[in-house]
Amino acid sequence: MIHRMAYERRMRRARSMRAYALALMALLAVSLLDRVVYDALTWPPERRAAGELEDWYQMLRTVGYLPAWLGVGVGILLLGRSEGSDRAASRRAAVVVLSALSAGLAAEALKLLVGRERPEVSGVEGAWQGYVFRAPFGALADPSNLGFPSSHAATAFGGAFALAAAYPPLRWLAFVLACGCGLTRVLSGAHFASDVYGGAALGWMSWRWWWRGLSERWGWGGAVLPRWERVG
């Protein structure tokens, strides 16, 4: 029994390493398309002011706003209370909120470490500048105009992955909304496509950490990853 458990842990670790390697290769692939995506999707300066006031834009951007996921957590608690399953609902709410929170915080911290600026010159809409990196530790002195990874995307996908795992029928809605949030960041010229991808990857990692860690501690079914996410 002990040997079998050790074998399963090794296999799980190997699958996880493959998943992370694939995620890194995908980041490199998306990075090659950054300029193409910018030219195809980013609004010209004269379109942005009106576009960013559109209701659909505001709705999708809010998916990357942490208080929105706090509201989702409260909704899960209220739903659980009405169904008489307070404990299970509180645990699901905790995973959703913590996944979104930690992903967003990790993105902000990683911005300071990477020091890559946004696609456009600070304060000049439409002025593409490509990849510009700050000097080592330079971002600590001036954290403005940093882009990689997108904290909106990280928060959105951290919450979306957790919500999809806790309530599988909602998974497609959660992922569509999270992708929509990422799209708003590209449309506005605030982020490269690779910034959004990096944020989404952080959201995925944050969810996996909380889902496995808390579920194993609590002894509930969340220790088993959903079928759509059996990569490690």
Image (cartoon, rainbow, N blue to C red):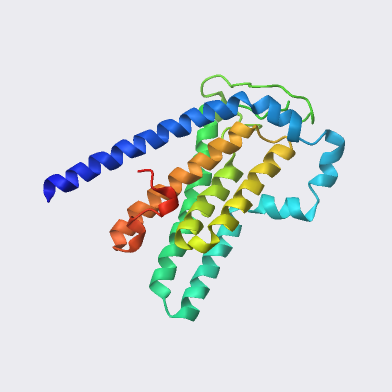
User: Residue 3 in the image: x percent, y percent?
Assistant: 13, 45
User: Residue 55 in the image: x percent, y percent?
Assistant: 78, 55
Q: In the rendered view of the protein, which quadrant contains the C terminus? A: top left
Q: Which residue lies at the image location 45% right of the left edge and 51% below the top edge?
A: 228
Image-based side of 113 in relation to 173, left or right: left
Asked if residue 40 is positioned above or below residue 92 in the image, the reply reads: above
Q: Quadrant of residue 12?
A: top left
User: Residue 108 in the image: x percent, y percent?
Assistant: 54, 39
Query: Is residue 220 visible from the viewing direction of this image?
Result: yes
Asked if residue 208 is positioned above or below residue 67 in the image, the reply reads: above
Q: Quadrant of residue 184?
A: top right
Q: How many marks?
A: 0
Q: Which residue lies at the image location 37% right of the left edge and 34% below the top edge?
A: 18
Q: Which residue lies at the image location 68% right of the left edge and 50% below the top edge?
A: 61
Query: Could you say which is closer to the camera, residue 42 or residue 227?
Result: 227
Query: Could you say which is closer to the camera, residue 166 or residue 124?
Result: 166
Asked if residue 142 is positioned above or below residue 135 in the image, the reply reads: below
Q: Which residue lies at the image location 61% right of the left edge and 58% below the top edge?
A: 68
Query: Is residue 147 visible from the viewing direction of this image?
Result: no
Asked if residue 42 is positioned above or below residue 6 in the image, the reply reads: above
Q: Quadrant of residue 191?
A: top right
The residue positioned farthest toward the right in the image shown: 46
The residue positioned farthest toward the top in the image shown: 135
Query: Could you say which is closer to the camera, residue 72 or residue 24?
Result: 24
Image-based side of 73 in relation to 53, left or right: left
User: Residue 156 in the image: x percent, y percent?
Assistant: 57, 50
